Amino acid sequence: MATYNKVLIMGNLTRDPELKQTPSNQSVAQIGIAMNRKFKDREGTMREETTFVDCEAWGRTAEVMSQYLSKGKPVFVEGRLKLDQWQDKDGNNRSKLKVVIESFQFIDSKGGQSSTPPPAGTATTAAPPADDIPF
């Protein structure tokens, strides 16, 4: 059976990236992104819903995101879905779906690509421009 696991999202950071090191000295950053959707309900009233997505980045990508992004900044990320499963302290099974970031683009405050190129050596090159995202 063929599978395909690709996620493209653009939104604003809900908090500053939380950069940590694993015991093997690998960088990992936890990042929250919020996306807004505006729509009309059945009565014709404009509504807005917000979706919050937890993400994680690894290695140099985590370090660059932590260094240059902060709460409220817009970002475009490309990654894959990952399901984490664990048991809580009461023995209940828990799970959480998140995006593992494979690449990202800085977005300027007007919603386009940043005119400032990212620092040399960053892992941000695979994402398409915001207006080239297929929907």
Image (tube, grey):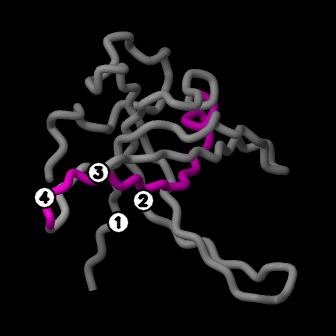
Alpha carbon separation for disc pair 2 and 1:
5 Å
Alpha carbon separation for disc pair 1 and 4:
35 Å
Number of other residues with Cα within 10 Å of mark 4, as a class: few under 14, some 14 to 19, many 20 or more: few
In the rendered structure, which segment of residues is drawn in magenta? 43-64
Q: Earlier in the sequence, mark 2 or mark 3?
A: 3
Q: Amino acid at mark 3?
A: Arg
Tell me how many marks there are: 4
Q: Is residue 127 above or below residue 86?
A: above
Number of other residues with Cα within 10 Å of mark 3, as a class: few under 14, some 14 to 19, many 20 or more: few
Front residue of 44 and 115: 44
Mark 3, residue position: 37
**Secondary structure under the numbered disc 3 in the rendered image:** strand
Alpha carbon separation for disc pair 3 and 1:
23 Å
Q: Which quadrant of the rendered structure holds the N terminus?
A: bottom left
Q: Amino acid at mark 4?
A: Gly
Mark 4, residue position: 44
Q: Earlier in the sequence, mark 3 or mark 1?
A: 1
Asked if the residue under mark 4 is in contact with the one under mark 3, i.e. CB atoms within 8 Å, the reply is: no
Mark 1, residue position: 5
Alpha carbon separation for disc pair 4 and 2:
35 Å
Q: Amino acid at mark 1?
A: Asn
**Secondary structure under the numbered disc 2 in the rendered image:** strand
Q: Earlier in the sequence, mark 1 or mark 4?
A: 1
- Mark 3 vs mark 4, foreground winner is 4
